[in-house]
Each structure stands twice: as C-alpha cells, then as structure tokens.
Image (cartoon, rainbow, N blue to C red):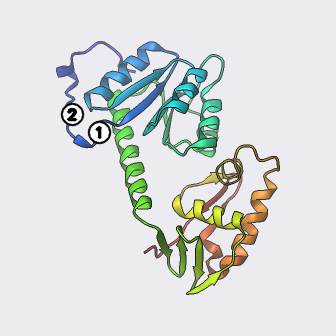
Amino acid sequence: MNLKNKTTADRGLCRSEDYSEGIKILIVDDEERIREIIREYSSLEGYIIDEASDGAEALELFNRHQYALVILDVMMPGMDGWSVCREIRKISQVPVIMLTARGEEYDKLFGFELGVDDYIVKPFSPKELLARMKAIIRRSSAAGEDNQNKDRISFAGLVVEYNSRNVYVDGNIVNLTPKEYELLSFFTQNPNRVFSREQLLNSVWGYDFTGDNRTVDTHVKMLRESLADYRKFIVTVWGIGYKFEARGKK
C-alpha cells in the first residue's frame, strides 16, 4: 500500500463533486495509519469521517449515528469484521466495504454472503478505494431516492403497492399472508441483490426470530405459488440464498 507521506498537491486530489458534501462514513480498522490515510483522502472529497479501532466501538458508533457507508477491516482484536458486519446487517442495509489482507476466493464469497458490497485486499491504492466508495454511495443514494419516491412499483405484470400493501398479478389482486407480503416487499425494494437465508430472517422476521432457515424456504415456496407465472422472479442462488431478478420494470 502506498502509505508514504505525500502532500495534498502530490496526490493530485481535489473535491470535484458536491454530492459528497455532508455524507458521513464510518472507518473501522485497528491500524491507526490506515484510518489516517483513508480519512485524509475521504476528507478531501468532503466526506464526514468517524473512526473506530475495534468492533465494539464500531457498533456503538453505528447505533448512534446514520452512515452512508462503512469501511470495515476483517482482522481486528476482539470482535472481528465479519462479526461486526453480521450485527450491522441485522438492523441495516448500509453499504459495507471490507478491508482485508487475505484475498482468497472463499473469504470473498463469505463476505458477499454476509451482505458485503465490495471487498478490497490489502495492500490497496487509496485512490482506488475512494473511487469504489464514490460508486457505491452513488448507487445507494439513487436506489434510496427511487424507493422513497414510489409507493407503487411494477415488474412486468407484477405490481406492488407499498402504502396499501396490495399485490396484483396481471391485474388481479393476490391475497398474501403478512409475512409473504413483507418478504416480497423486501425483495422488490432490493432487486438483483443476493441475500442469504440468515439475512432474510434478520431483515424480514427480525433478529429475535427463534426458528431456523427452513422458514425462509417455506415462505419463498408459498410466495412463488402466489405469484403464479412471476414465480421465476425469485431466483434461487445455490449454496447462498435468493435474489429478486425481474425484467420489464416500470
């Protein structure tokens, strides 16, 4: 990692886009020098930075503040990054970038199963990290605005009305159980993203649910039956979980 001291001019960075103003980011890493470098580059772009040196401190900050992005180191004393990410995903879908010295495919797949949005292997280029941060924040902001501005969304002949909780298939209202509706609502507001069964349990049923992963499979099966020809929109990702993938969104 190029972490040598450089002047701001040498880095050639400037705050080129106003969209970053006021956006708050949490950096979690037990290495102070890495936090310092990320903070310097991020601050040049106008981001507001909070820092934590361990998992417990990170969760304490996360529970008190609203963040647009979490940058999270995997290997930390005490609570590691995987455990912190798992706790965050119980209550939030905030974007998470993992930092790690290990680049094995298994580690990456494990991270994506937990709901990690991106994965940076050390040593890394701070400029590349910043570029990835910007891209993720843009996508997350656009998706959030899109969902907030809509109380009705259509995927071909499947229509979900969030305010009334009505669901239509080819113009006909479909009677869903409350949990089927909540599962469909979660899927349609997070399209094309793979969720593990544990993530779905945490997000739809709540982290205090006492059942097991088979509950998700049962409800997915019931929901697919209710959606008739649009059952194909709920795709099984073998070995991981499910995603909602539809064509013809309106």
- Can you say which quadrant of the picture contains the C terminus? bottom left
* Residue 152 on image: x %, y %: 47, 71
Q: Is residue 65 above or below residue 146?
A: above
* Residue 44 on image: x %, y %: 26, 27
What residue sits 38% from the left and 34% below the top? 24
What residue sits 66% from the left and 54% below the top? 204
Circle 2 is placed at which residue position?
A: 15
SS type, badge 1: helix
What residue sits 38% from the left and 50% below the top? 141
Residue type indicated by callout 2: Arg
Residue type indicated by callout 1: Ser
Circle 1 is placed at which residue position?
A: 20
Nearer the viewer's eye, disc 2 or disc 1? 1
Mark 2 or mark 1, earlier in chain: 2
- Can you say which quadrant of the picture contains the N terminus? top left
In front of the other: 241 or 122:
241
Image quadrant in which you'd find residue 164 = bottom right
Q: Are marks 2 and 1 in contact (CB under 8 Å)?
A: yes
Q: Is residue 41 visible?
A: yes
What residue sits 60% from the left and 42% below the top? 91
Mark 2 Cα-neighbour bin, 10 Å: few <14, some 14–19, many ≥20: some
Q: Is residue 99 visible?
A: no
